[in-house]
Image (spheres, rainbow, N blue to C red):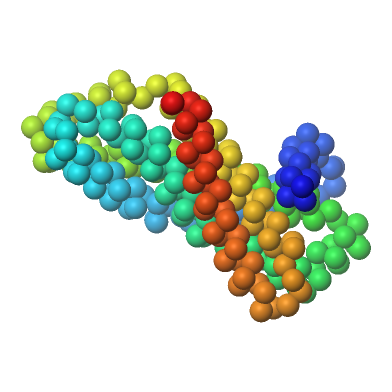
Amino acid sequence: MVRAAFTLRILALLVRRPKNGRRQVKRAVIEQIYFTAVQALPLIIPLALLVGSALIIQFSKLSGELELGKAAVILIIREIGPLITALVVILRSATAVTAEMSCMTVFNEIEAMEMSGVDPMWVLSFSRFTGITSAVVCLFVVFDLAALLGGHIVTWVTTSQASNTFLFEVARAISGTDLVVSLIKALLFGLIITVVSLFHGYTTVRKVSRIPVSVSQASVESFFACMFVNVFVSIVFYQ
């Protein structure tokens, strides 16, 4: 119940945003997007290329060349891509946000903000939620494109298909449902990662030694929650 109330309080700020501190919040959102998305590109692009190449190589050995485009959509766009993207965001941003909020809690910085009339849910939580969720959506797109590019290169080099056959197969296999599901997963993953990280940060026991514990708990909980949501959404739309 506490986490549900915490989540609703963050979502309520989407509808009723305070007028004070909007410039500060916008700056924090931009900084969060830069850290979560832009600085993650040197990691996410090579990872996507390797994953896309490896999956297509293995799948081509099992089923031949005719189903590679459909396999890429099923494996990369629907399932593996969202999970790996979420994992990268958790390892980089969830840990950072949890550590930041935990330090602010331990050293009474959040209480100081409240005493000065600043709402930490607006300045800190809302900006992290908006920035991380927007970044997850962008990274979903980047990962899928890079992974499909890796698969395209592999099929062009290792099979007898024409250079554009794989891309045509992907375009024929992908549907509007796949795009909608990807967007839903991105939004839910962003919400999960943000809420779990902030909640553990705000509720950290006020001892410095408890900060690593909160970071570890937030990371593990975020990953398993994203896995559960990924499976649940796939069952709802594809079963």
Residue at x-position 77% and y-position 51%: 2
Q: Nearer the viewer, residue 151 or 116?
A: 151
Q: In which quadrant of the rendered view does residue 78 lie? A: top left
Question: Would residue 22 appear left or right of 169 to someone viewing this image?
Answer: right
Estimate the x, y position of residue 128 in percent, counting from the top left: 66, 51
Q: Quadrant of the C terminus?
A: top left
Relative to 127, is 213 above or below? Answer: below
Please provide percent x and percent y for residue 135.
54, 45
Vertical order, 40 against 176 (above or below)? below
* Residue 218 visible in image: yes
Q: Position of residue 124 (x, y in %)?
A: 73, 55
At 64% from the left edge and 62% from the top edge, which residue is drawn? 98
- Residue 131 showing in the rendered view: no
The percent position of residue 125, horizontal first and vertical second, equals 72, 52
Q: Which image quarter: residue 203?
A: bottom right
Closer-to-camera residue (82/19): 82
Relative horizontal placement of residue 190, taking residue 176 as reference (left or right): right
Residue 31 or 136: which is nearer the viewer? 136
Q: Is residue 175 left or right of residue 190?
A: left
Q: Is residue 77 above or below residue 102?
A: above
47 displayed left or right of 12: left
Give the residue drawn at x 39%, y 56%.
43
